[in-house]
Image (cartoon, rainbow, N blue to C red):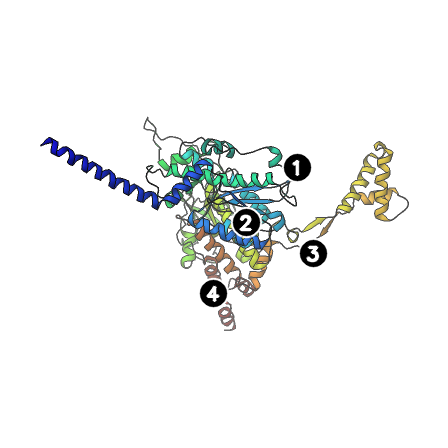
Amino acid sequence: MADLKKPQLITAKTAFLATAGVGLLCIVMRQRARILARLRNYRNPLGEKQIRVIETPDECQRVLDTLKRHCHEYKVLGFDCEWVTVGGKRRPVALLQLSSQKGLCALFRLCTLQQIPKGLRDLLEDDNVIKVGVGPQDDAHKLAFDYGVGVASTLDLRYLAALVNQKPGGLAKMAKSLLDVHLDKNWRLSCSDWEAKVLNEKQLQYAANDALVAVKIFEKLAKKLDAKPFWNLSSINFTKIQERLQPFYDIRFKEGSLNNIMATERRKSITTTGRKAKQKQMQTRSISTRSRALYDNCNLQAPDGELLCTIDAKKAQWYVDQGLGVVVAKTPLTVRLNFEPSGRAVGDVGRYYQTPKENRCVVCGRLDPLSRKNVVPREYRKHFPVVMKSHTSHDVLLLCPDCHQLSNIYDLRMRMKLAEQCDAPFTKEESAVKYYELPELKKVKSASRALLQSQNEIPAERRNILIKILLDHYKMEELTDELIKEAANIDTTRSNENYCQHGEKVVSMYETAFGGLCELEKQWRQHFLTTMKPKYLPDLWNVNHNANRLEIRAQEGRVEKEDLIVAGLSIVADVESVAKC
């Protein structure tokens, strides 16, 4: 009986193995392209590199079409920049490198293009495409300063390395340890002439490798972050990866900062002794934070006791010191005016000012540290009429340094949109400079000052050269002391006839052509809501707040017709009809 069962068992095992083999073969056939790609990448991650140098807008558009198609499949780009330093001063970014996961290395020669084309700008500002590198925020800052573009969703690879228990290091070190790739980081290459008419082969390889290695390192580390069994050849869950990496977007990597963020994520606030652990807050050096609370939520009352608004303690004490009010309660501090105010709280506008405000980041809810954020930037607000510049607390919100930094990056997009709409550049272009210095006059002034201060100490040959500079400029044959003194005080600057201050031009255009200043305010507020998605805004915060406030003031006869016209309010006609009655 046992002998009969043995052949049956062998037959069953054979059938099982055959079935498993066929299934495995089917899997291999379905996934053969992915398997081959993995094998090629394992052998040489840079083996499929395709370098494209872009110097014209047409070339730019063709390459962008391919890059965007690649990003649709894998939303990550290797990101890097190169520039030239002359005399210790950095010149504008000359080369922008973007590399897709499929090996396309696009080298955009910005020094030749002279600007960032709209398609490239849109790709850089796309939140959904992660731009990876080591220290990419610094490169993004340079692009923002030089070309006015806000690069969104930059990620320092060192954060990702630390998340999967890999040692965070420089790009070359991580390339060697993770990909077994050697990057040539010779200073002669990194400091070479990136503005040269034609880039040589070594420069092209250096620039392309930096961007491509970055995206390959991301790919390697992301697989560790979304680990799967070796037989599971499915793609990583990109949505899950993005959720894990979201807190690290657009944040500079600093020693110690990663542990703080990870500790917050895990909510490990209790030590082994049962007491709360003191966590060192991550600081952002570029954002100054407040040393005291912004909102004291003291009450200001009308003479009959009606609540007008909440104010800070310093302002409340000022009313008392000036003899304009008296303290009627200490908790909370409440001051009652002894004169009738010009207006009282009306509608939602009035209730907004009456409502106590929380001292917390309106985006993420963080309590400390905090800094003030002007939702409508001062560069525009300072050109508003007085009636719209006053009472602007509605547009001053509290943000933590990280949210503030991210918001500033998003604001660059809005500025670029306004710059294009109003023909009001704000970058370091000729039209953005109010005064420019004439080199010839500067040379004359320098020569005259040298003769005045140390004429006897200057060698005769050099003194003759300086004298000739002055004589040639003034077209005279003999130099006098009076002429030297006049030249020493010469004005070397001239007004730029093409000067255009961005904020002033935008405000002027909205006053006359784009629906009024309330529309400009509304756009900035909506931009803040859309980009930052704040969860802790004060109650009754409204994108139409100032328009509603001005309408109430107009109905009470406390605003001029001209100001309503500038604001772009339709209530002007109603005010005129009331005035005639």
Residue at the image position 38 percent from the left and 36 percent from the top: 224
Q: What is the spatial separation of the Cα atoms under label 4 and label 3, in whole angstroms?
A: 43 Å
**Which structural element holds mark 3?**
loop
Which quarter of the figure has residue 346? bottom left
Residue 253 relative to residue 379: left or right: left
- Characterize the local packing of mark 2: few (<14), some (14-19) or many (20 or more) Cα atoms within 10 angstroms: many
**Mark 1 vs 4: CB contact within 8 A:** no
Q: Which residue is mark 1?
A: 88
**Looking at the picture, which amino acid does disc 1 mark?**
Gly
Farthest right residue?
477
Residue 266 sits above or below residue 323 on the image? above
Secondary element under disc 4, as helix, strand or loop, is: helix
Residue in front for this viewpoint, 552 or 24: 24
Residue at the disc numbered 2 = 149
One can see residue 127 in this view: no
Q: Relative to residue 103, is residue 424 depicted above or below?
A: below
CA gap, disc 2 and disc 1: 24 Å
Which residue matches tag 4? 555
Q: Residue at x 43, y 32 (%)?
A: 280
Q: Where, by quadrant of the figure, is residue 467 drawn?
A: top right
Looking at the rendered structure, the kind of residue marked 3 is Glu
Which badge, 1 or 3, comes first in the chain's sequence? 1
Give the amino acid type for the residue marked by disc 4 in the picture. Answer: Gln
